[in-house]
Amino acid sequence: MSTLLFVYGTLKRGCVNHHHLAGQQLVGPARTQPGYRLYDLGGFPGIMVKETDREGVTGEVWVIDATSLGRLDEFEGVHQGLYRRRTILLLPPFATDAIHAYFPTADSSGLREVGAEWRE
């Protein structure tokens, strides 16, 4: 079984943790619907809901196999409670697909907003 995953930070092509997606299939560039922003969590981003946002966040959609998804959950600290994987709303052509993304469990209080795109 495979999962569609939206990546928006260090897992994107050309970024430091992209090697975690080795062997997986890139579907293409994507953008969230408005209502999401990126925040700096200390050298890496976290996507969070921000109802006043009108721009959304840019990233990539990947097809991830079950084994790799388990490794990504471990890398993102899902079982430690650092991130949770849940569905996210994207713009067409992905608007009707069930796409997952990693959301930090921390709130945005005191975090620096970095906008719509993470650049390393």
Image: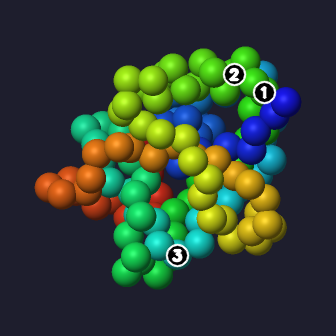
In terms of secondary structure, where does tag 1 sit?
Answer: strand
Q: Is residue 8 above or below residue 84?
A: below
- Residue 19 visible in image: no
User: At label 1, which amino acid type do we have?
Assistant: Asp
Which residue in the protein does label 1 denote?
65
**Residue 76: horizontal and vertical position, in percent?**
47, 29
- Apparent side of residue 116 relative to residue 21 in the rendered image (left or right): left
Lower position in the chain sequence, tag 3 or tag 2 = 3
Lower position in the chain sequence, tag 1 or tag 3 = 3
- The foreground one among 43 and 74 is 74
Which residue in the protein does label 2 denote?
68
**Residue 70: horizontal and vertical position, in percent?**
63, 21
Q: Are marks 1 and 2 in contact (CB under 8 Å)?
A: yes
The figure's colour scheme reads rainbow
**Residue at 59% of width from left, 72% of height from top?**
33
- Structural distance between the alpha carbons of marks 3 and 2: 29 Å
**Residue at 52% of width from left, 75% of height from top?**
34
> Total label count?
3
User: At label 2, which amino acid type do we have?
Assistant: Ser
- Apparent side of residue 49 relative to residue 111 in the rendered image (left or right): right
In terms of secondary structure, where does tag 3 sit?
Answer: loop
User: At label 3, which amino acid type do we have?
Assistant: Pro
Q: Callout 3: few (<14), some (14-19), or many (20+) C-alpha neighbours within 10 Å? A: some
**Residue at 54% of width from left, 41% of height from top?**
85
- Structural distance between the alpha carbons of marks 1 and 2: 5 Å
- Apparent side of residue 110 relative to residue 9 in the rendered image (left or right): left
Which residue in the protein does label 3 denote?
34
Q: Are marks 1 and 3 in contact (CB under 8 Å)?
A: no
On the rendered image, what quadrant is the N terminus found in?
top right
On the rendered image, what quadrant is the C terminus found in?
top left
**Residue 102: horizontal and vertical position, in percent?**
51, 42
